[in-house]
Image (cartoon, coloured by chain):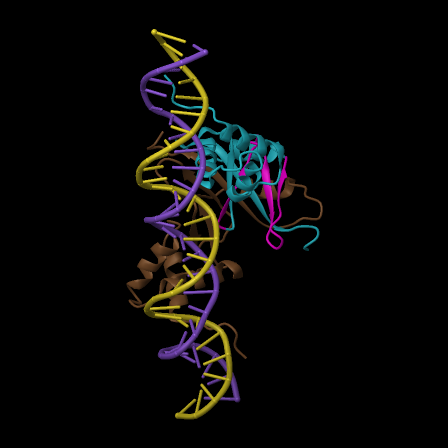
Chain colours: A brown, B cyan, C yellow, D purple
DNA sequence: TATCTATTGATAATAATTCCTATTAAGTGA
DNA sequence: TCACTTAATAGGAATTATTATCAATAGATA
């Protein structure tokens, strides 16, 4: 019995996400994967990205009304420049660990913490 | 010389945001303010909400592809139930303070930290 | 290799947000 | 108080990211 099939589309999408640290939007992923699978559909990209988010293999961030996808699901934070739009990773396990340890939400079962620093990057400030 | 005018629309929008803790979407704000200003336009609500976000008088959260607005701009965290969609405030200054103190981003000027806990609420888990 | 059915490609549909423009009304100064 | 300037509004059209639909295709299993 099969209920999830491994297709070239899925492989190439995940491969691309693992090869970059740029937090691409679905459209950017689409353009990149198109180089390997010229007739891939944008719907397929969205469909698979959402599936990967649901299964926990990909992270989805919402910035400025758009979804950004991240192939790195290890605990890390993000930093966003409000002026130029640059979005970068921040590896600081201390902060997420501290947050989870101290949050104290009786009954609430935390599965994920998202931390986003907004401000101005070196070039823009 | 005037460059920002205080209109009834703005006043009612802000009044509404200050009266609730439900993190309404633009549409919900629109329906609420309509009770006071029946012919207010949805575009006006969006225009003013965005203006308030830019000026720092209102907070904007992105959850599930929608903007949610929060009239409380004091430092606090948010907690979101992935199943029922409930979004609640978490007042825990320790965590944001710790995050800002420990983030260590040379050159980056942090103006705001957003912390979102995702998981299952008491009823849903 | 034949079969089953999950997945795809193409495109239509949806929905949140922004844009456009004639009209209205805040704020200012006479 | 009143007229004037122009920022802001109402209403609706336009835009755009994302999702739904469905016949055709291609993974997995035996």
In which quarter of the view is residue D27 placed?
A: bottom left
Residue under the point 57% across and 30% down: B15
Residue B105 seen by the camera: no
Q: Quadrant of the C terminus of chain A?
A: top left
Residue range in magenta is B65-91
Give x and y (percent) for residue C27: 43, 17
Q: Quadrant of the N terminus of chain A?
A: bottom right
Residue under the point 61% across and 55% down: B83
Give x and y (percent) for residue C17: 43, 44
Q: Nearer the viewer, residue A94 or D9?
A: D9
Left/right placement of residue B82 relative to residue A36 reads right
In which quarter of the view is residue B76 placed?
A: top right
Left/right placement of residue A28 relative to residue A50 reads left
Give x and y (percent) for residue A6: 44, 71
Residue A31 seen by the camera: yes
Q: Nearer the viewer, residue A25 or D14?
A: D14
């Amino acid at each position: 019995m099969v209920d999830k099939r491994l297709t070239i589309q899925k492989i190439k999408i995940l491969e691309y996400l693992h090869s970059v640290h740029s937090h691409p939007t679905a459209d950017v992923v689409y353009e990149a994967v198109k180089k390997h699978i010229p007739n891939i559909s944008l719907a397929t990209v969205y469909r698979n990205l959402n599936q990967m988010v649901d299964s926990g293999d990909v992270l989805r961030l919402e910035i400025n009304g758009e979804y950004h996808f991240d192939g790195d699901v290890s605990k890390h934070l993000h930093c966003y420049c409000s002026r130029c739009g640059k979005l970068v990773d921040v590896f600081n396990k201390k902060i997420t660990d501290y947050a989870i340890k101290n949050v104290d939400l009786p009954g609430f079962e935390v599965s994920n913490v998202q931390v986003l620093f907004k401000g101005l990057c070196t070039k823009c400030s």
